[in-house]
Image (cartoon, helix red, strand yellow):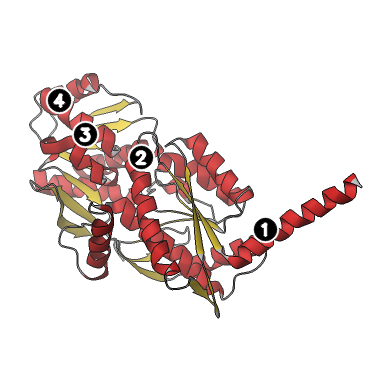
Amino acid sequence: MKRVLLIALVLLFATAGMARAAESIRIGFNIPLTGDIPKVGESSRNAAEMLKEDINSKGGLLVGDKSYPLEFIYEDNESKAESAVNVALKMIERDEVLAIIGPNSSKQAVPAGGTCDDNRTPMISPWSTNPDTTLDRPWVFRAAFLDPFQGPVAANFAAKKFGAKTAGVLFDISNDYSKGLAEIFRQVWEEKMGKDTVLAFESHGTKDQDFSAQLTKIISAKPDFIFVPDNYNQVALIVKQAHDLGWKGPFMGSDAWGSAELLDLCGKDCVGQYFSTHYAAAGAKGATKEFIDRFAKKYGYVPDDVAALTWDATRMVLQAIQDTGEVKSSVRKMRRSIRDALSDIEKFDGVTGAMHFDEQGDPVKCAVVVRISEDNEFVFTEQVCPDE
């Protein structure tokens, strides 16, 4: 009797899983709602919720000849690599999501990407720029450009704008994104300017709050500017502490600066600084401006690049689902169909720009450089596109 009951329960749960896949479209969001960069998670969730409300208010996502309500599941990876892996496993096994959006930061996206690829679940990172996130992982995609592209953008802009011949670098040794981009930047800079023109190459830990020792070494080397490929929360501390130590030169930043919270944390210390990123909200037009205006009205702040990239990443997954032509009852088969459809997307017009994809699932798209203005805006300075 117990054996019969056990078999019945197994069949019940299996049937429930298949029915759930057919009745709604369930997508997971592996995002940092706590930890070092909670604003990143908040921006992702806000963008996703606005998109979900848009679609569900019209009866759901039309796939074939039937509409399905969207069900978004948000899980906190705490800005930790181990937690991101655990969240991915939970969403794959317990929640039976059809696809996962995130993680955003490369520190979490690289290990979680391995988990999703091993478990044959499509994953798309909105914000990760480290090549290892998607490298040789056919189930993993992204909406952001890569660091081998961003590194030269930052180096070329700094050389031109600042008339710089030498550089200093400060980066987070524990963060795949920061460490990788710092190394790419140094290689590009010294190929451009000559050996030993990166006068100081200093690292710190993720939890560090005092950067005075590293900054003292960098400032004493007298570089023409300092490149800081760190998350926005660290940037605010670094820039302020550098100014307290007497640094009057410019900084060059990267896309991890691009959070709405940077302006609150850094204030006037960051005014006039530049960083490379994915889009510029100030002066946007068309669909991008419409997205910005709606988001700002709904949530009370201008959407940062994470919000815009999450919007694009989620739309890409939804387009792939529509391109499959039907929602299969088998979660595994549906995941495979979504992966194949994502691979087949030749071009996508997003709020962060038009893009097409290479064989690794990486978008080929333009970057922009923005200036932090006196009005606390990220103002477009120039656009840099890959060589076609």
Residue at the disc numbered 2: 38
Label 4 SS:
helix
Q: Label 3 to label 2, Cα distance in Å?
A: 15 Å
Task: Say which of 246 and 52 sits in front.
Answer: 52
* Kind of residue at badge 2: Pro
Task: Say which of 213 and 220 sits in front.
Answer: 213
Q: Is residue 215 above or below residue 59?
A: above
Mark 1 or mark 3: which comes first in sequence? Answer: 1
Residue at the disc numbered 4: 219
Tell whether 375 sits left or right of 93: left
Q: Do the numbered discs 3 and 2 sit on residues whose CB atoms are within 8 Å? A: no
Task: Say which of 245 and 100 sits in front.
Answer: 100
- Which label belongs to residue 17? 1
Residue at 42%, 69% in the rendered image: 57
* Kind of residue at badge 3: Ala
Tell whether 274 sits left or right of 34: left
Q: Label 1 to label 2, Cα distance in Å?
A: 32 Å
Q: How many marks?
A: 4
Q: Label 4 to label 3, Cα distance in Å?
A: 17 Å
Q: In x, y percent, where is residue 138?
A: 54, 57
Residue at the disc numbered 3: 236
Look at the image and tell me in which quarter the C terminus lies: bottom left
Label 3 SS:
helix
